């Protein structure tokens, strides 16, 4: 029985590690598609349409008895949730990838955990006691991780020479100007802030709408609509919407089915169980995987500053994780879920259950 409890305790950790592997592959598939000519805004729209279509039958049949009745207030909340997680964050995120590189973007994503932690503490979703060793670890972990990100951004250092030829080359040959790199950095920072708000909002929305498959479906369709409107305003060429049987179609299907569909659903499950800060703690793993693949497989330059900064970020993130685990263990040593330890339990009302999609 104790063994089963340990497996249950680490199930969210395993899920998040698998999720980071899925996100890692997305970086390179997406960059290859963009280099091929795929419009990033069109890509976001198509990807979420695919996600919504794939998730809809599962949500409809598997959560018939779980979905609460949709109210105007709940629809408005889902609209705002989709806006921060899709309409704003993803459009700015992939626009920044166009101006920078997968390694840089993956590195900056590490700020999301620290930003989410700060917001969660401000909203009293996270317990912070600096006089407790684990509480102090949370603060130090946040500061250290932010310092690591600044080191990766401001300091390059010497280039680590690659001793063999890369296996693949999907990068474009055009160079990125400092001006474009700055634009990409600003867009990426704004997307990180938007994502942090999105993670925090998920915990509150799941309290009123605990149907995770259905919520994933709603966010996909609403986010696709928001992105389509934005795309129509900034991209007036009908040819940009054309997509063929090539890397563009592959990246759209992979991102829609795996990332916006399956991985977002798994993320919602982990958020409900462990909280938004826990979910964002695993972002450094993506940074390591992206840097390794970019260096060994694609031949991308790897700088000592990036290696040192990544090490600092990872140390800070897992110091924060060590401190956070204390908040989910009671005085008797019994493990508590995030909902039990914070009081963010789902609102259940038998009269409000319905079979509406």
Image: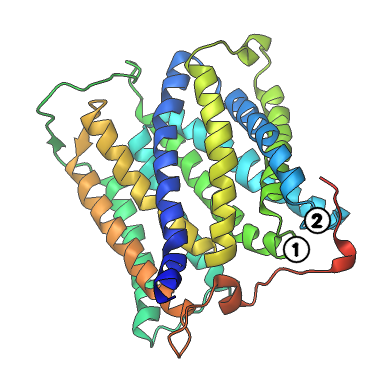
Residue depicted at x 46% and y 53%: 15
Closer to the observer: label 2 or label 1?
1
Label whose residue precedes the other's in the sequence (2 or 1)? 2
Give the crowd class for mark 2: few <14, some 14-19, many >=20 residues within 10 Å.
Answer: some
> Mark 1 sits on what residue?
208
Left or right: residue 112 compared with residue 313: right
Looking at the picture, the colour scheme in use is rainbow
Q: Quadrant of the C terminus?
A: top right
Q: CA distance from mark 2 to mark 1?
A: 8 Å
Q: Nearer the viewer, residue 335 or 28?
A: 335
**Residue 192 visible to an observer of this rendering:** yes
Give the crowd class for mark 1: few <14, some 14-19, many >=20 residues within 10 Å.
Answer: some
Residue depicted at x 40% and y 83%: 130
In the image, farthest residue toward the left: 163
Left or right: residue 56 compared with residue 183: right
> Mark 2 sits on what residue?
74
On screen, residue 20 above or below 272: above
**Residue 114 visible to an observer of this rendering:** no
Residue 103, by quadrant, is: top left
């Amino acid at each position: 029985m104790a063994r089963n409890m340990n497996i249950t305790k680490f199930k969210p950790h395993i899920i998040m590690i698998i999720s980071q592997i899925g996100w890692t592959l997305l970086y390179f598939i997406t960059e290859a598609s963009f280099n091929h000519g795929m419009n990033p805004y069109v890509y976001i729209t198509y990807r979420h349409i695919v996600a919504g279509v794939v998730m809809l039958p599962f949500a409809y049949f598997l959560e018939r008895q779980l979905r609460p009745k949709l109210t105007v207030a709940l629809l408005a909340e889902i609209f705002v949730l989709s806006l921060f997680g899709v309409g704003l964050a993803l459009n700015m995120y992939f626009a920044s990838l166009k101006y920078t590189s997968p390694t840089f973007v993956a590195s900056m994503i590490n700020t999301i955990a620290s930003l989410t932690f700060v917001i969660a503490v401000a909203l009293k979703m996270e317990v912070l006691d600096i006089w407790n060793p684990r509480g102090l670890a949370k603060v130090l972990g946040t500061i250290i991780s932010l310092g690591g990100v600044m080191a990766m951004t401001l300091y390059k250092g010497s280039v680590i020479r690659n001793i063999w030829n890369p296996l693949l080359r999907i990068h474009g040959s055009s160079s990125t100007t400092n001006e474009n790199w700055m634009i990409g950095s600003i867009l990426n920072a704004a997307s990180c802030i938007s994502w942090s708000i999105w993670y925090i909002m998920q915990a509150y929305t799941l309290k009123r709408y605990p149907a995770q498959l259905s919520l994933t479906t709603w966010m996909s369709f609403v986010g696709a609509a928001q992105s389509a409107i934005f795309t129509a305003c900034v991209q007036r060429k009908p040819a940009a919407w054309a997509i063929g049987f090539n890397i563009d179609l592959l990246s759209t299907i992979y991102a829609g089915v795996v990332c916006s569909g399956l991985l977002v659903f798994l993320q919602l499950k982990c958020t409900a169980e462990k909280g938004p800060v826990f979910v964002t703690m695993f972002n450094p793993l993506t940074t390591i995987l992206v840097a390794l693949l970019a260096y060994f497989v694609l031949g991308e330059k790897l700088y000592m500053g990036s290696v040192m900064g990544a090490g600092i970020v990872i140390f800070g993130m897992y110091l924060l994780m060590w401190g956070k685990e204390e908040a989910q263990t009671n005085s008797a040593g019994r493990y508590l879920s995030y909902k039990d330890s914070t009081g963010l339990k789902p609102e259940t009302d038998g009269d409000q259950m319905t079979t509406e999609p």
